[in-house]
Each structure stands twice: as C-alpha cells, then as structure tokens.
Image: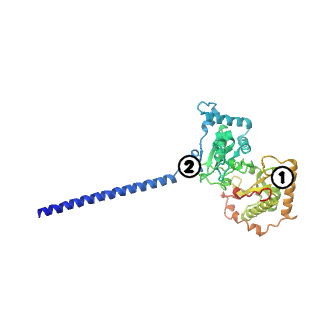
Amino acid sequence: MEETKKKNEGWKIAIAIILIIGVAAAIAMSSMTYLRLDSYLAELEKEENTETTENDVVIMDEYKIEATTQISDAYISGDTSSLSDRDKETLDMASKVLDEIITDDMSDFEKEKAVYDWMTTKLGSDRGVLTVVPSSGEDSDNPYGVLKYGNAVCVGYATTFRLFMQMMDIECMVVHNSEAYHSWDLVKIDDHWYHTDIYSDSDSNTYAHFNLNDSMMANQQSWDTDFFPAADSLQYNVAYQNMETFDSIDEIPSIVKEKFDEAKGSVTFCMTYSGEVDEELASRAVAVMQIIENQLMNYSSNYYVGSYGWSYSEDDNIYFMTVNLSVYNGEEVDTNDALTEEEQEEFTNSIYEMFSDLYGGSEYDYSEEYVDDTENYDVSEEITDESATDEYSTSEDEVVVMDEEGE
C-alpha cells in the first residue's frame, strides 16, 4: 500500500509538472503572438503617421527629392570650399544661367518669370508612359543632370527651379502630391505663396501652371495642405493679370478669338462674368467652350483649346474661368516661336471662318441640348458657395490633338 501511495504521489507530481510546463508554454506562445501582433500594429501606425517632409521623398519609387541648399548658400556667401566637385559644377552651370537672364533691377516676380521662361524654352521633358517615368537621360531628377544634359523629369524641374529661387534668396519649396507620383514648386513672392509646375508647361510656355493659388492647383493635384503653406493670392498669376470681363455668354467666342489673334502661339487667360456667377451661368459658359473646342478640333489639327475651368478667388470674391489655348503649325512645332506674318494672316482668317461657322451668320442659339451636355461640369453646390475651392475643367490627359490628317 505504501508503495502504491508513493507511485500515485509520483504521478501527481509528474502531471503537475507537465501542467505547469504546458501553462508556461501557452503563456510564452501567447506572449510571442501578442508581441508579433503588437509589432505589426505599431508598424501600421508608423506607416499611417508618417510625417510629411519636403526633402528625402521618393517619387514613383525612383526619383528622390534632395536638398540643394548647400549650393545656394555657397552662391550667396561666395564660399564654395565645402562643396563637392559635382556641386561646384552644378553651381557654375546655374550661375551662368542667372548671369544670362537676371538683372539687378528686376523684381522677385520678374526674376521668377525669367527663370520660368528659360526653363520652359531651354529644357526638355523626359516623358514616359507615366508623369515622371523617363525614356532617356541621366540624372534627370536633380539640378546637376538637368543643367548638364538639358533633360528633366518633374522632380528635376522642381528641384532645379527651387535651386534658382534660393540662389536669388527667394523662398521656395518642392511639393509632392499625396500619391507621390508628381512634384512641383511653391514659391513666395511679396509675402504670398504660389504654385508653379514648370514640368506641366515645359512643352508650351503658356503660363497655364504658373503662380496658381490652392483653388486652381487643387483641380489637378492633392497634397498635404497642413504641412505646405497656403497659396492664397493671384496677384502674380499671368492668366489672371489678363482677365477679361463679359456681360453676356454671347461675348465668350469673340473673347476667345481675340486671344487667339494675340497669341501667335499659345496663351492662357481668364474670363469673369460682370454679374453673379451661378450654376446656370457656369454650365452655359462651359457649354460654349465645349462648342468652341469641338469646332477648333474639327476645323484644323493646328489649333485646340487645351483646358478650361472655373476657379474662385477669395481676395477678389469672384469666380473666373481660366482658358488655355494652344496652336500647332505642322508636324514639328515649337509653340514658343511666333508665327510669321503670312502664317498669322492665314491663322486669323481661319479663326474668322471658324467663328462664322459657329455662329451661322447670326447670334448663336444656346439651346438646352448644350446645357444638358455639361453633367461633367456640375457646379450646383460649389459655385454658389463663397468658400468653394473646386475648379471645373477638362484635364490635360483628356485633350486629343489630331495629326495633320485629322486622325
């Protein structure tokens, strides 16, 4: 009996030990699972709470926005001793450009515009299937490669423009959109910030993306508005400076024709209504622009309306329509070159003929079929709200440019 009792106690102890080991193992496994889960959640939280920065941002998983203040600081101070050979070469190339295009009597706006004009006419865009995927070119995402080889993706345009601005002691930041596939600049002129996207204007020099406010830029891109400063002025927007006021919808075609006559290439301008812009007025104005665009594209592959859309200016408390007009003259066209007198006469006559066809020899009847065809330009709520920031425009991706045979 005593021996049996000892055996039973032994089994009890063994079972107890096994249970203790099992519980300990379960606790350990639970702890490990918890740690893995906790680590996973922490990683998710880290990704969600990634802070926005200006530099060290990778665009399209390939092109990095890098600071160049070491170069601009060296230019301002005159001390290049701390620069690498590559940075010294970049500074030398950038300095020669500024010596060529900048004079001491220029305002900050005139300096900015001079740099814009130089970059849109002298540099080429490395364009691939996507916005910033290059087809060729070395170092096309930084000022060294852009200035040396004359070829740039959007990151290259943005960082090179910022370098020029900072060399002239003009505040400038590189902005990236929320999806990190595009970048452009915010530049500060006379205490106000403006969006400037030179990459998007590199083939036209129309100022279509030059010194936009947040409202205009938000129609095309989204970005971290909590991090980047607000662009709330249009004082130095070239299109806005060329504002035309119309008293009747019927005046829009004549305004567009006048701008075409003046353009001798491509031009961006604004129109605003003398009265209150409501939903119906905005829709009818867009309908007229649709008619003009269709007529131009049907008439000739040389002329087209690049984009148009409504915006709101808080400073002026008005709504206005921005219109981008482009002209093509042959297979290989540099739209920055003015037309010859003969070409201008031919162009003007063709526009007269187009508008004659549009009007049919009399005042045009803006019937409901055109108004009803503007569902993509619904402005029902936003256009009557003074805090609205949306624009209503055709996107550049939707613009179809026909070849010489009209295909």
Q: Residue at x 17, y 63 (%)?
A: 8
Q: Quadrant of the N terminus?
A: bottom left
Query: In this image, 386 relative to 16: left or right?
Result: right
The crowd level at tag 2 (other Cα within 10 Å; few <14, some 14-19, many 20+) is some
- Dividing the picture into quadrants, the one containing residue 101 is top right
| SS type, badge 2 | loop
Residue 284 lies, in percent from the top left, at: 76, 64
Please report whichever mark, 1 or 2, sits nearer to the chain's N-terminal start.
2
Judging by the rendered image, the residue that carries numbered circle 1 is 261
Judging by the rendered image, the residue that carries numbered circle 2 is 52
| SS type, badge 1 | helix
- Dividing the picture into quadrants, the one containing residue 359 is bottom right
Residue 183 lies, in percent from the top left, at: 63, 49
Q: Can residue 170 be seen in this view?
A: no
Residue 82 position (above or below residue 122) = above
Query: In this image, 330 relative to 152: left or right?
Result: right
Question: Are the residues at dot 1 and dot 2 in contact (C-beta closer than 8 Å)?
Answer: no
- Which kind of residue does numbered mark 1 sit on? Asp
